[in-house]
Image: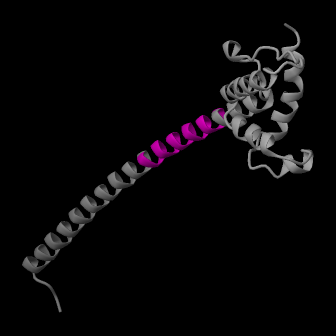
Amino acid sequence: MTMTSEEMTAQLGTQNLQITQLENQTLLLSQELEKAANEHNSLRTQSASAVMELKAQIKMLMEKREKGMNLCKVKNLEPDILVGNDDKTIHVRYKRWARRLKGYCEACETGFRKILDWAEAEHDKIGNDSLALSEWTQTAVANAQLYIQPAHLGDH
């Protein structure tokens, strides 16, 4: 079966139309692919920036943690030296001094007052084992700082 020239022309026209449609679809797909690649690069840049920011925050927190707790930061809250003598006001002065010490410690490190209240209420000897059971993560550092604190208060 032979095709007439009109049929061939019609078939060529249909094929040219299909080619044009395929070219248009290819162009659209190329544009979508380029857009997706740009979005991917943007997200990669944003995630890299977020990772760098998180690393910087972690480094800052680690440096802060390495420096440890310092009870000598808040000078105007420092308790005075408690002079112990056997007069009848020592109990009242001790309570005032203890309250000021707790406030000072809490101002320096959140959570200090709670652990000091716990220690004050404890009737048994407090050792490293009982301190380890504390929920406060800074207990060991705080304990070490409290041993330094009385010496600091005696320097006046």
- Residue 37 in percent (x, y) is at 44, 49
Q: Is residue 108 left or right of residue 139?
A: left
* Towards the viewer: 20 or 56: 56
Q: Residue at x 48, y 46 (%)?
A: 43
Residue situated in front as seen by the camera: 61 or 111: 111
Q: Find residue 18 and report its horizontal and vertical position in percent.
A: 21, 69
The secondary structure making up most of the magenta span is: helix
Q: Which residues are magenta?
A: 39-56
Answer whether residue 50 is magenta in the image.
yes
* Residue at 34% in and 54% down: 32
Give the image location of residue 14, x and y in percent: 16, 73
Q: 116 and 21: which one is in front?
A: 116
Count of marks placed on residues:
0
Residue located farthest toward the bottom when viewing the structure as drawn: 1
Q: Is residue 18 above or below residue 72?
A: below
Q: Is residue 83 above or below residue 41?
A: above
Is residue 101 shown in magenta?
Answer: no
Q: Residue furthest top?
A: 156
The N terminus lies in quadrant: bottom left
Image position of 26 with respect to 141: above or below: below
Quadrant placement of the C terminus: top right
Locate residue 100: give its quadrant. top right
The image quarter containing residue 91 is top right
